[in-house]
Image (spheres, helix red, strand yellow):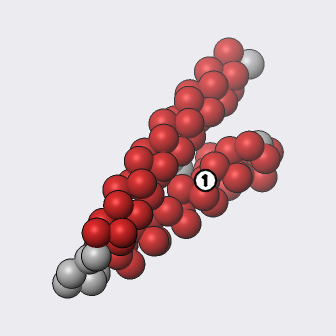
Amino acid sequence: MNALGGDFLSRLLEKDAEFKGIYEAHRSYEKKVAKLGKRPHLTMEEELEKKKLQKLKLTHKDKMEEIVSKHRRLEVGG
């Protein structure tokens, strides 16, 4: 999602409530994974939680990419 221009991302977050919700959840998962990644040792439960969060993050990224593609097609198609 880093390839999105700031203006395009801002418009999309403003116009598309579904995208905004998915984007915010993705960011939340990203922060939690990063926080767990900073710990020197994880318990088995924490390791499982990290893997679960990574999968959710990837799923949300895929959904965001689908929405971005749809909006780009609409912009180009008019």
Q: Residue 67, percent across and down?
A: 62, 33
In the image, taking residue 2 as reference, residue 48 lies left or right, namely: left
Q: Residue at x 26, y 77 (%)?
A: 42
Q: Residue furthest front?
A: 44
Residue 40, quarter of picture: bottom left
**In the image, what residue type sits under mark 1?**
Tyr
**Mark 1: secondary structure:** helix
- Is residue 72 among what the camera can see? no
Name the foreground residue: 24 vs 71. Answer: 24
Q: Residue drawn 41% across and 47% down?
A: 55
Examine the rendered structure and indicate whether residue 16 appears above or below residue 71. below
Instruction: Pick whichever, 8 or 20, lies toward us.
Output: 20
In this rendering, does residue 5 appear at all? yes
The residue wearing badge 1 is 23
Q: Position of residue 51 (x, y in %)?
A: 35, 56
Point 63% across, 25% down: residue: 70
Q: Quadrant of residue 74?
A: top right
Q: Quadrant of the C terminus?
A: top right
How would you rate the neighbour count of disc 1 (Cα within 10 Å): few for under 14, some for 14-19, many for 20 or more?
A: some
Tell whether 7 sits left or right of 31: right
In the image, taking residue 35 as reference, residue 73 lies left or right, namely right
